[in-house]
Image: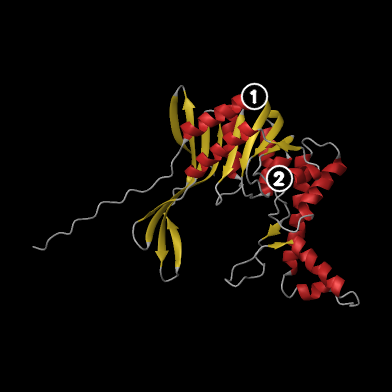
């Protein structure tokens, strides 16, 4: 009788830490220091401002209630600008005055969220960015890896301006040569997206700026002044372009950085390698939190390497929004279903 080879024990799947008790303690300190409720919105570098964040925010605000002033801690690399408008609109239904707390990066669509705040308080390491739009279109040019590249209106306009400055005696239309590299529909789509971005900024600023000319000037500056989408707009520059920005109090900034440290620990990758072609990935991407409630989105899926295609594919995807609540002194965990 052949000996039976024992099956190796299943490897325990790693889970990211959920530090609810620690983050709640910091949020309570911030609320006491600021004199009002604190809502947090934090993105992992691989997370982004997305539509489901608004549903998650509503879960937090339902527990928070309505207040004269709400303080919003925001740390994000950006995402959808249209979601930014929905995000601020929902916050504004729960407060008369909104104050954005920015200790670190607050880029692109996250900058748009701060435009809807009556005041932006920025720490020593904080920065906003330009909000000019780049678009990855189905007809965009291909890069060397055969992937579609993003095209921005500012880049296209700069090409045309450079052409005209160097070919001022030429009667040839620069778009004739440009169309050989960028499809006309892509140029039209990017121009439309740029108009949308300016409109969104004006709508957000209208929550606290009644002067339409001033709001348009700020929106135009953020969309077209800066030569780089990621150009860091520091406190002095934010004031210069017309935003109501002020320094963060040192004690508040220290607590926000501690909160970011805890969220960063929660957001670390927790990858379990079973062998060369199988693995399981767990990672928390977006976190929203208020008093006694925390909602976060967690990637939770198996990865399998398909050698004939030389790429990883996902299987058994159980990624979901998850909620932790404190009710009558007890913690209740649940899946938050979002369609």
Residue at (78, 76) in percent of width and height: 177
Which numbered dot is residue 246?
none
- Residue wearing tag 1: 35
Vertical side of 213 occupied by 118: above or below: above
- Residue wearing tag 2: 112
Foreground residue among 262 and 213? 262
Residue at (70, 58) in percent of width and height: 134
Q: Secondary structure at mark 1?
A: loop
Where in the figure is residue 96, as x and y percent of width and height? 72, 28
Residue 202 seen in render: yes
For this orientation, the residue located farthest to the left is 1
Foreground residue among 171 and 105? 105
Residue 117 seen in render: no
Question: Left or right of 326: which side holds 4?
Answer: left
> How many residues crowd mark 1 within 10 Å: few (<14), some (14–19), many (20+)?
few
> How many residues crowd mark 2 within 10 Å: few (<14), some (14–19), many (20+)?
many
Real-space CA distance between mark 2 and mark 1, rounded to the nearest whole angstrom:
25 Å
Foreground residue among 189 and 45? 45
For this orientation, the residue located farthest to the right is 169
């Amino acid at each position: 009788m052949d000996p039976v080879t024992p099956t190796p024990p299943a490897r325990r799947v790693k889970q990211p830490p959920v530090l609810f008790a620690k983050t709640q303690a910091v949020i309570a300190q911030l609320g006491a220091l600021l004199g009002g409720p604190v809502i947090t919105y934090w993105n992992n570098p691989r997370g982004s401002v997305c539509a489901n964040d608004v549903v998650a925010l509503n879960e937090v605000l339902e527990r928070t209630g309505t207040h004269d002033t709400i303080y919003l801690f925001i740390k994000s690399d950006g995402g959808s600008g249209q979601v930014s408008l929905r995000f601020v609109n929902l916050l504004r239904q729960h407060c008369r005055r909104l104050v954005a707390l920015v200790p670190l990066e607050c880029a692109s669509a996250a900058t748009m969220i701060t435009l809807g705040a009556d005041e932006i308080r920025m720490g020593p390491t904080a920065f906003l960015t330009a909000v000019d739009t780049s678009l990855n279109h189905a007809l965009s040019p291909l890069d060397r890896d055969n992937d579609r590249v993003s095209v921005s209106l500012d880049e296209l306009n700069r090409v045309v301006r450079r052409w005209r400055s160097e070919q001022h005696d030429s009667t040839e239309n620069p778009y004739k040569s440009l169309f050989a590299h960028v499809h006309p529909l892509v140029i039209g789509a990017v121009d439309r997206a740029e108009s949308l971005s300016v409109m969104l900024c004006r709508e957000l600023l209208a929550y606290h700026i009644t002067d339409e000319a001033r709001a348009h000037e700020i929106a135009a500056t953020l969309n077209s002044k800066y030569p780089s989408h990621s150009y860091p707009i520091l406190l002095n520059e934010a004031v210069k372009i017309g935003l109501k920005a002020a320094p963060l109090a040192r004690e508040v900034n220290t607590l926000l950085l501690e909160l970011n440290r805890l969220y960063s620990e929660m957001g670390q990758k927790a990858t379990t390698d079973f062998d060369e072609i199988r693995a399981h990935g767990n990672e928390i991407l977006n976190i929203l939190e208020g008093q006694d409630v925390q909602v976060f989105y967690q990637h939770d899926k198996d990865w399998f390497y398909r050698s004939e295609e030389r790429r990883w594919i996902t299987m058994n995807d159980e990624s979901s929004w998850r909620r932790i609540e404190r009710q009558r002194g007890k913690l209740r965990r649940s899946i938050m279903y979002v369609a």
